Each structure stands twice: as C-alpha cells, then as structure tokens.
C-alpha cells in the first residue's frame, strides 16, 4: 500500500510538471502565434472572402451591400470568353516561359560559381564571393532602373552592338517572341505571317501561335536581370553545402581513378541533392511571384508580353478596382505554386529510401 501511494504521488508530480511545461511552452510561442494570426492568417482569410465577392474597393468588403458571387471570379478566368481571360492566359504563358528559363539558368550559374569559389587553389576567394553576391543585396528597383537605361534604344548595349555592325533590337518595343524571330531568321516561318494551322484552336482562348511564341525581347531582358541578381544568393547555399561534403569522399574518389566530371556527377551532385531541392523550390516560388521588375521596367508592355499573374492581380485590383478578380488571380497563383512545389518534391524524392521503406521486413530466425 505504501509503495502504491508513493507511485501515485510521483505520477501526480510528473503530470503537474508536464502541465507546467506545456503552459510555459504556450506562453513562449503565444506572441508569435498572435502576430502570425493578425498579420498573416487573418489577411489571407479576408482576401479569400474578397475573392468570392464583387467588391470594388469602396467601403468595407463585409457589408451586406457587397455582392457575393461565389466562385464566379475563378471560373470566369477559365471559361468566359472576354478580355479578362485573355489577359490571364497571356500572363500564364509569359510566366511559364519565364520560369522555364530563369530557374534552370540561375541554378546552373549558382552551382558553377559555387564550384569555382570553392576551389582550394583559387586566390582572392573573399573578393569573388563578395562580387558574385553583391547583386543579390542591391535594391531590385535600382537595378531594374539601371537595366532600363542600359537596354534602351539609345543605351549602352545598343551602341555596343552598333560598333560591331549589329543593329540592336527595340528592346522594350518589339512584341514578337524570340522563337518566332529565330524561326524567321532561319527562313522557316514569317513572324509577321504565321501559318494558318497555328492561328486558331489553342487552349483557353489563345492561338497555338501565341502559346509557341517564346518570351519577348523585353521579357528576355528581365530574365537576364533576374538571373544576374539571384544567382549570388543561391551560390552561397551551394557553397555552404559544398564545404560540408567530407574531404575523404573526394580523396577516395581520386584514389579510385575518378576524373573531375565523374567526381562531380557521382560524388558532389548526390551530396548536394537537399540543397538543390531547396534552391529549385525557392527559385520556383520567386519566379511565379515576379512583380517589381515588371512594374518598374515594362508594366506588362509591349503588347502584354511581359504581363505576369502577380502584376495582373495588382493591376486588376488597384487600377481596375475589381478586387474580387484580383484576389482570385492571387489565389490561383498560390495553388499553382503549391502544386508545382509538390510535383518537384515528388520528382526529386529519394527513390532508394522510398523503395526500402516499402520493402517488407523478413522475420528473423530464432
């Protein structure tokens, strides 16, 4: 009986201690929870409500006089044949080309720079690391204005091309896609007279000729800017991962007779897989949210070839005063980012570990 009473007192003390720990833990995280709720979760829920209404920005969106339209703001972007759907699909097309070029380019460039500054025999490592990282900490607005002057019709790039006898394009005036221009340069198609088979029948209101145009010259300029300014940050991520790779692995591969490219393929890249996934995910999210460069340099021009969903959401809400459709575009963009990130995670999963986890465990022999 005495032992039972002692055990009960010990159990009661243990439960009391656990309760105190739980209360203390909640008290510590309460400020962060309150701040995230007020400034993150609550605005998201309010924006979700706005996307279901026809609010024009006047007064409160929670008034009884604000019409509730349900999912019409979402469905009209895909089904209704009007200018709003054409603008949305054009922005999606532009962003697809933007993502398809920027994410691989900045990843490869960042990895190459990291491998270069990680070399033992390289002199002036601190200088090169600072020089490569400096564009990433520079104001994107300031760099965008600088590029706008450099690539203007009388800018430095145009004059430099003129010196070598090349007539530079009208960087922010030519609305034709670079794929059309390249096919026209080799004489396969006429960019001003597209084939009749590609002028209609495209999905979501755009002709196949528009879907297959490629990024415009202005969009390529923005792509060059973004790759230059973002590669430094990803370079530091790769550099930190490279310095965590054990030197013994590289030395063992050298003793086995592996060349430089074999060591990169079979030793370095597998060890960089978690960092590579992080870089690709951050790059995917950032490229689908591109806004400030477009706002400063082109505002969707020429002929909407630099229009992106993020900028279209801003323009629809704050310029056209259609806050419901603007919020709907932002939530569609959110869904696109989540789905692509999940797909990327599925593609880059560790197949060997997943295979071993599904393999049945054989019983041990006694």
Image (tube, rainbow, N blue to C red):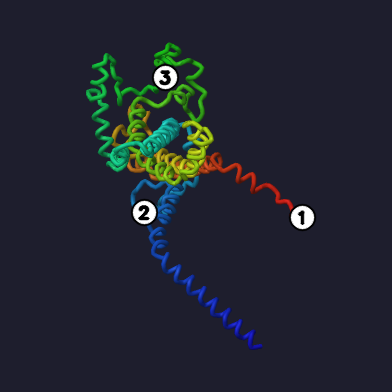
Counting labels gives 3
Q: Residue 231 placed where, x, y %? A: 37, 37
The answer to the question of whether label 1 and label 3 lie on touching residues, with beta carbons closer than 8 A, is: no
| Front in this rendered view, residue 359 or 224 | 359
Mark 3 lies on a secondary structure that is helix
Foreground: disc 3 or disc 2: 3
Element type at marker 2?
loop
Of mark 1 and mark 2, the one earlier in the sequence is 2
For mark 1, give the secondary structure. loop
Name which residue lies at 36% across and 54% down: 60
User: Alpha-carbon neighbours of circle 3 within 10 Å: few (<14), some, or many (≥20)?
Assistant: many
Instruction: Answer whether labels 1 and 2 touch (C-beta < 8 Å).
Output: no
Position of 357 relative to 114 (above/below): below
On screen, 236 above or below 34? above
Checking the image for residue 219, the label placed there is: none
Along the line of sight, the residue nearer the viewer: 131 or 54 = 131
> Which residue does the numbered mark 2 point to in the structure image?
60
Residue sitting at x 57%, y 80%: 10
Cα–Cα span, label 3 and label 2? 47 Å
Q: Nearer the viewer, mark 1 or mark 2?
A: 1
Q: Is residue 61 left or right of residue 202?
A: left
- Residue identified by numbered label 3: 180
Farthest right residue in view? 366
Front position among marks 1 and 3: 1
Considering only order in the chain, which callout, 3 or 1, is on the residue closer to the N terminus? 3
Name the residue tied to disc 1.
Answer: 365
């Amino acid at each position: 009986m005495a032992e039972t009473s002692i055990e009960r007192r010990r159990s009661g003390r243990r439960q009391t201690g656990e309760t105190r720990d739980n209360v203390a833990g909640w008290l510590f995280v309460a400020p962060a929870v309150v701040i995230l709720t007020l400034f993150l979760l609550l605005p998201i829920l309010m924006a979700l409500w706005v996307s279901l209404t026809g609010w024009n920005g006047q007064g409160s969106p929670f008034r009884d006089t604000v019409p509730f339209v349900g999912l019409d703001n979402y469905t009209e972007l895909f089904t209704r044949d009007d200018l709003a759907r054409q603008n949305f699909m054009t922005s999606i097309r532009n962003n697809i080309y933007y993502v398809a070029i920027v994410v691989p380019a900045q990843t490869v460039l960042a990895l190459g720079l990291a491998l270069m500054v990680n070399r033992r025999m390289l002199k002036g490592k601190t200088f090169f690391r600072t020089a490569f990282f400096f564009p990433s900490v520079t104001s994107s607005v300031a760099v965008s204005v600088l590029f706008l002057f450099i690539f203007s019709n009388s800018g430095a790039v145009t004059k430099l091309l003129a010196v070598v006898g090349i007539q530079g394009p009208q960087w922010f005036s030519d609305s034709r896609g670079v794929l059309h221009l390249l096919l026209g340069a080799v004489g396969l198609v006429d960019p001003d007279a597209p084939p009749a088979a590609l002028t209609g029948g495209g999905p979501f209101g755009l002709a196949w000729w528009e879907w297959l145009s490629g990024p415009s010259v202005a969009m390529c300029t923005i792509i060059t800017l973004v790759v230059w300014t973002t590669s430094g940050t990803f370079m530091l991520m790769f550099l930190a991962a490279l310095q965590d790779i054990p030197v013994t692995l590289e030395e063992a591969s050298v003793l086995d007779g592996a060349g430089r490219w074999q060591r990169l393929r079979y030793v370095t890249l597998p060890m960089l897989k978690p960092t590579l996934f992080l870089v690709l995910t951050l790059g995917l999210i950032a490229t689908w949210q591109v806004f400030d460069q477009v706002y400063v340099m082109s505002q969707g021009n020429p002929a909407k070839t630099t229009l992106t969903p993020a900028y279209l959401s801003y323009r629809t809400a704050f310029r056209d005063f259609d806050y419901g459709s603007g919020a709907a575009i932002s939530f569609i963009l959110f869904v696109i980012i989540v789905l692509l990130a999940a797909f990327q995670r599925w593609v880059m999963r560790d197949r060997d570990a997943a295979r071993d986890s599904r393999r049945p465990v054989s019983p041990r022999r006694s």
